[in-house]
Image (tube, rainbow, N blue to C red):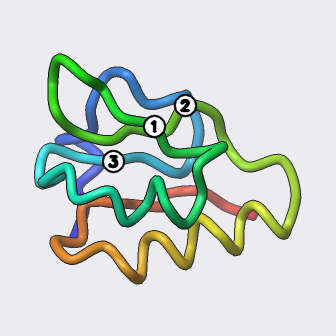
Amino acid sequence: MAKVHDRFPENAEGPFYVDHQCIDCDVCRSIAPDIFVRHDRGAHSYVRRQPENEEERELCREAMESCPVEAIGDDGDW
């Protein structure tokens, strides 16, 4: 389970984030490429921007459920 205190600093401010458990597997980036991007130097994903509508929030939830190491968190109220 992702932990907010372990989130990468590159994450956009908001409820969705990627933490230090990320193994750079590309699953989240393939599901929601407009939201999740790769940090090349750090070899991990992060949230470039928060979702702007329900469709994008659903993609983020799908990415979170598909993450093999549970590195994606959602600490927001929608």
List the residue tagged with mark 3. Answer: 18
**Residue sitting at x 83%, y 69%:** 55
* Three-letter amino acid code of the residue under disc 1: Val
Distance CA(mark 2)–CA(mark 3) = 10 Å
Q: Secondary structure at mark 2?
A: loop
Please name which of the two marks, 2 or 1, marks the residue nearer to the observer: 1
* Three-letter amino acid code of the residue under disc 2: Arg
User: Where residue 46 sits: x, y (%)?
Assistant: 39, 38
Q: Is residue 29 above or below residue 64?
A: above
Occupied quadrant, residue 21: bottom left
**Upstream in the sequence, badge 2 or badge 1?**
1
How packed mark 2 is, by other alpha carbons closer than 10 Å (few <14, some 14-19, many 20 or more), is some
Of residue 33 and residue 35, the one placed in the foreground of this image is: 33
List the residue tagged with mark 1. Answer: 37
Distance CA(mark 2)–CA(mark 1) = 6 Å
Q: What label does residue 48 carry, if any?
A: 2
Is there a contact, CB below 8 Å, between mark 2 and mark 3?
Answer: no
